[in-house]
Amino acid sequence: MFPTCRMVILGAALAALTLPPAARAQTLRVGASAPVTSIDPHYHTYSPNVSLDAHIYEPLVDMDAASRPIPRLALSWKLVDNTVWEFHLRPGVKFHNGEDFTAADVAYTIDRIPRVKNSPGSYAIYTKAISSVEVVDPHTIRLHTKQVYPLLPIDLTQVYIIPHTLGADPATEDFNSGKDAIGTGPFRFVSYKSGDRIEMDRNDNYWGPKPDWQHVSYRMIPNDAARTAALLSGDVDFIEAVPTTDVARLSHDKKLHLAETVSLRIIFLWLDHRGMTPHVTGPNGEKLDHNPLTDLRVRQALSMAINRNAIVDRIMQGAAIPSGQFLPKGSFSYVPGLNPPAYDPAKARQLLAAAGYPKGFRIELDGPNDRYVNDGKIIQAVGQMWSRIGVQTAVNAITWPSFIGQANKGAFSAFLLGWGTSSGEASNPLRSLIATRTPAKGWGAVNRGFYSNPKVDELLTTALATADDAAREKLLQQATTLAMDDVAFIPLHNQKNIWAMRAGLTYAARADETSRAQEVHPAK
Amino acid sequence: MSGMAEIAPAAPETPLQRFVRDFTSNRLAVGALVVVLLIALAAIFAPWITPQNPYDLAQLDIMDGRLPPGASSAAGMTYWLGTDDQGRDMLSGIIYGLRISLIVGIGSALIAGVVGSTLGLVAAYAGGRVETAIMRLVDLQLSFPAILVALMILAFLGKGIGNVMIALVLVEWARYARTARGAALVERRREYIEAAECLALPRWRVLFRHLLPNCLPPLIVIGTIQIARAITLEATLSFLGLGVPITEPSLGLLIANGYQYMLSGQYWISFYPGLALLLTIMAINLVGDQLRDVLNPRQQR
């Protein structure tokens, strides 16, 4: 009895070992850096969710690796009137449940989004410009907007289409259980273990190029060291967000391959633009009756005192590029020649003296220590550099939830934040970060430095009402230049997104940070 | 004590002389005491003996970050134990870190000792409801893991050395209370307490002038061990990012900073602070063990 049993097990083990490599290679095991909060594509605007959703669902318009819009479920789109966008939909596309994809599904999705219950971050921000939906025929749909709204195709890259046969208001729980997790994407949902993994199978009826993987195991490993270790030990084939401390080592490992690209995420320092600020005092700790940061020369000095190359080289270990504006080179509305100020501590001191602070002042520099790559280390390094020009800096790094709570209340004078420009063009950061706080318009929603410049607002208003791409780009470039020359905030660097995978795989690194199994290919 | 056959000395020994003789009979303990004293001296005189003030950002340079032990800075200074990612001299960082460890360790052990012992003595002397109330509180406190309680307190109070000490005192007082009560229960049945009470001395006087001195030996032993425990706890809390601010790293935070570089082979950022922590705690524990042997009446002949 026992010997037979053993023989069977041994036989099975041998069979597994001798399995053709092709069959084993059919599975891709992905190590993601953050747990998703739902399988419902309309529940929470959160980048880990967007990354996963792109496997199962598809939007009308997608982004390519460099974050430029490309057709996905829509074949083409155009403005037929100043306030009417017309989308021609791709024919012959089927959902995972076998139903045809038509304009009714688009209308259904746009209708559902604002009504998702308990959403911690609603996708309605991407659909609220749409005032009405007109289904022309099964493969043509017209979206009406109240005003000219050139950004609609870009907003729709975040809107994943679900079938209208799910009925009135499907519950988020039914997506998480898999019952309603139905899209048109290259993979179909198999199972979801909250906080652990999502299993997916290839959609063999996919309309586009078939993925190379029969099966995808999408595992969530938030601990950096554990994720790297999982790749090194062969538990996963592909990891995202490689920690900068490990980049040097992994890039020398012949069994591994790295892919990297400059991210749309900028890391910057906010300076408080209000008349009085909480954490700036005189050189001996005495109270000041004004805020030195409102003086342009002081802001220029603080920016000039920062050795961005040293931060990129020593702290980020090369996994970033010094930055002087919102977006990296190659993006829509990037301003050629708008570089960060050269590192010049001597000139920074002169500027401080000219502004009336020959002995500097004291400032507290705050930041999170668990949100952005090396955040706590970056503010310490900036603290070193500011101290050298006579600005005595106390550095305070705290955990993200309490940091962002205080930042929202305006409790800081100088602090580090990051901004990922999901739209890939400058109107998004200009509207959210730089525009004067105007809650009614939704402008300046995260303008935590209380910056206000009427000229920038005016240019932005004009840009948002300009349908012509070239003219709009020009206006956005002007607004960006104005804000940066005025040191609205101090840009530090654009992070690089780095993926690591076992040798023999390739990945076209994406600027939007998402990891997509369908874009991982065996090297030819 | 080992079975040394000793001849009674000619002159009667004072208790202190006897204590010194007993203590020095173990060479390992003497060595440990020397280590403790050296660490204490280094910590006290840190600003004068370290090559750099590791807490002054203006003295650090990230261009000197992650240099291996023995490397020199652009300015010609030698980093004997290397530097961390901010260009902080590890040797200076460790000595300043030891300073924080000792201040937090000794400070919290002393305060917890005073609070805990007083409550323990009062419980034993008063008895009845007071005793029940105090001792159930002690039981409650000791039923939670110390690190858990400390984490909760710090989550509520926020970071900072002062808050770490408050958390440690709140975590540690219960052990002193339990020990003090145990010792006091034995002592208070003795005749000298009865005699003192017959003289109608005030209660506080009986408590602190008669009862306390006779309960001291076990409390001293607990105290040394609690110092080592407090240092470990502080290092743990700082390692988890809840202790000291990032610009003033203690040993725990130094280890945490270097921990991320272990995979890339830059061992020194974690290794040397870890070694310093290990040495300190081992030395204090050895001294504590020897004190227990010397002060334990049952092991005296």
Image: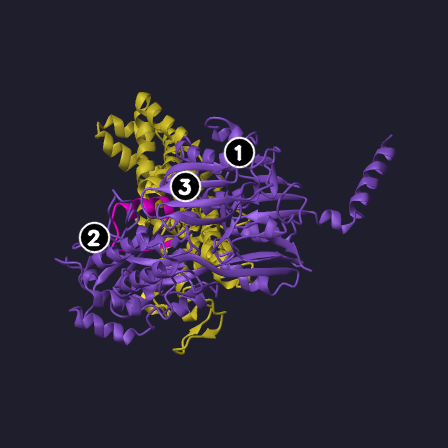
Pinpoint residue B90: horizontal percent, then vertical percent.
Answer: 43, 65
> Which kind of residue does numbered mark 1 sit on?
Pro
Characterize the local packing of mark 3: few (<14), some (14-19) or many (20 or more) Cα atoms within 10 angstroms.
Answer: some
Tag of residue A163 = 1
Front residue of A416/A337: it is: A337
**Residue at screen point 31% across, 34% down:** B211
Judge if badges 1 and 3 mark residues of a common chain.
yes
Q: Chain of mark 1?
A: A
Q: Which residues are magenta?
A: A399-418
Task: Give the percent coordinates (x, y) of residue A193.
Answer: 57, 35
User: Which of the two labelled residues, at mark 2 and mark 1, occupies the earlier sequence position?
Assistant: 1
Q: Nearer the viewer, residue B82 or A144?
A: A144
Q: Secondary structure at mark 2?
A: loop
Q: Which residue is mark 3?
A: A143
- According to the image, label 2 marks what residue? A278
- The answer to whether B37 is drawn above or below residue B175 in the figure is below
Magenta span includes A371: no
Circles 2 and 1, Cβ within 8 Å, touching? The answer is no
Q: What chain is tagged by disc 2?
A: A
